[in-house]
Image (cartoon, rainbow, N blue to C red):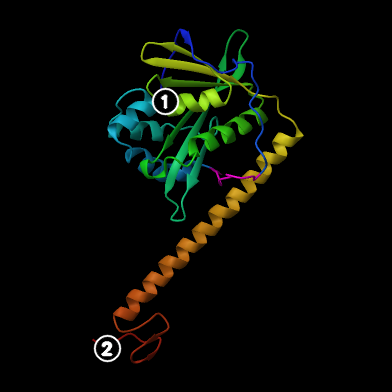
Amino acid sequence: MDAPQSSNDGGTGPDAARPAKNLLGLGWVPIRKLSSRHRPRILRHLLALGDHDRYLRFGYAANDEQVSRYVDNLDFERDELFGIFNRRLELLAMAHLACMDVGAPPSPAAEFGVSVAVRARGRGYGDRLFDHAALHARNRGIDRLLVNALSENTAMLRIVRNAGGRIERDGPESQAWVRLAPENLVSHVEALVEDTVADLDYQFKRQAQRLDELWSGNSHGQDAGFDLKSGPDGPGKRPKP
């Protein structure tokens, strides 16, 4: 991830409020909250990133050991993590909303980081994850999001500009603050609906995956000369040796 900069790069400034999205509208993507049991999927997702993508995501060329340490140290109680899954429950994209206190006196803020698998790019997943993270941050009383990004990370900087953030550049690094609107009843209802539908989507995909595995196992049994219900020597019997 990255640090401050000196030249203003557009946007409406850090006081701009992030506009709300239409609830389950056009372009909606199911985004599931991640928990500690998703660590193996998170690790697989991040280890699949190439060297340059890791450099853009972490601000340095993280090796496998460093990526593993990052995943091991994720705090799912303090922070929030969100993911987009395909129908095979492979993690295509994920966001990390890291909570922190800044300023004196300290006020709640959060840092946003995102990664998208190469095969899933160009679908707007980064924007959707930012919107989702911003919504959950608002509902936690957080009024600012910090984005540290390398200046060459044009995809991340575009997300920040679209959110109305002001980007400050300092050589190869950039830093941006995005001001969030206060929480309200609508933001809580929106989060509840999105989370509920995303959870149903995930459960449906998991059941479909189990059925596929069961069907695949049944097909292998038939190829061996028997199925799960009936073998060649009668119902429930296995073939004679």
Main secondary structure along the magenta-highlighted residues: loop
Q: Is residue 3 above or below residue 49?
A: above
Q: Residue sitting at 60 percent across and 17 percent down?
A: 12
Q: Residue sitting at 67 percent across and 45 percent down?
A: 193
Q: Is residue 59 left or right of residue 36?
A: left
Q: In terms of depth relative to the viewer, which is nearer, 216 or 150?
A: 150
Of the residues shown, which amino acid type is indicated by label 2? Answer: Lys
Mark drawn on residue 84: none
Q: Residue sitting at 37 percent across and 71 percent down?
A: 217
Q: Secondary structure at mark 1?
A: helix
Whether residue 172 is visible here, answered yes or no, is yes
Mark drawn on residue 240: 2
Q: Residue furthest front?
A: 10
Q: Residue furthest left?
A: 241
Residue numbers of the magenta segment: 24-32
Q: Is residue 88 left or right of residue 240?
A: right
Q: Secondary structure at mark 2?
A: loop
Q: Is residue 99 above or below residue 196?
A: above
Of the residues shown, which amino acid type is indicated by label 1? Answer: Thr
Whether residue 66 is visible here, answered yes or no, is no
Mark drawn on residue 154: 1
Q: In terms of depth relative to the viewer, which is nearer, 71 or 48?
A: 48
- Residue 171: percent from the left, percent from the top? 37, 11
Quarter containing the N terminus = top left
